[in-house]
Image: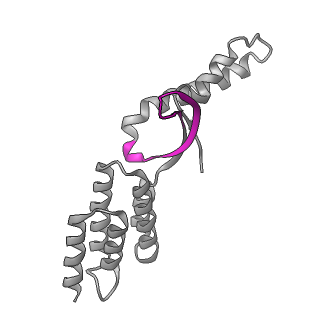
Amino acid sequence: ESAKVRDLYKRLLERTSHVKVWISFAQFEGTSGIGDGVESSRDIFEKAYGQLKEQKLNEERVLLLDAWRGVEKEKGDAASLSKVDKRMPRRVKRKRMRKDAAGNDLGWEEYFDYQFPDDEDKSAGALKILEMAAKWKKNDSDDSSSDDDSDDDDDTMLLRGGLGMTLVDE
């Protein structure tokens, strides 16, 4: 029976790579007495994570990591749980320009995106610049609190939306 269920999951994943199918398959494999065990479950989570990362499906990666963390809390050890926790993303607030059907600007829209540690190399430059600008701004305001702040609006604009993102720690 277990082999038939396993084959059914594999055929379903050939047709669709939906995150809920991956999660269900991994949880099935992790079930004691029915599946192949926690190691097989981890292998499925790894494969699913790689495929979702390749397809750039961030929301689905978060769902998968949450389910994986739950399996590790229940059946894993501290080391395996920490491996999953290291992959958990940081939630980032970003801004983008909204446009109507005719292409006219409607204004800025804020939205939340996820920044994964293993994707850091691609966007590290922009975040590093933003962090350095914030640090410079803080040091500059500490040093010259009584100076003329005529260029303050430009600096604030850079920090608020010039790069299109703001860090949010949760």
Image point 35% across, 74% down: which residue? 24
Q: Is residue 131 above or below residue 16?
A: above
User: Percent position (x, y) of residue 15?
Assistant: 22, 65
Side (left or right) of 89 relative to 170: left
In the image: residue 132, left or right of residue 56: right
The structure residue drawn at horizontal position 55% and vertical position 31%, both measured from the top left corner, is 131
Whether the magenta-drawn stretch holds residue 166 is answered as no
| Nearer the observer, 151 or 96 | 96
Q: Main secondary structure of the magenta part?
A: strand
Q: Is residue 113 magenta?
A: yes
Of residues 109 and 78, the one nearer the viewer is: 109
Picture coordinates of residue 152, whole percent (x, y)? 69, 17
The residue that appears at 46% across and 29% down in the rendered structure is 126
Where is the N terminus found, in terms of image quarters? bottom left
117 shown above or below 101: below
Residue 89 position within the rendered picture, expressed as x and y whole percent measured from the top left: 47, 51
Report the front residue among 95 and 42. Answer: 95
Q: Is residue 113 left or right of residue 25?
A: right
- Spot the residue most to the front: 102
Up-down: is 168 above or below 15?
above
Residue at 58% over, 28% down: 161
Image coords of residue 97 (percent x, y): 53, 31
User: Magenta stretch?
Assistant: 95-119
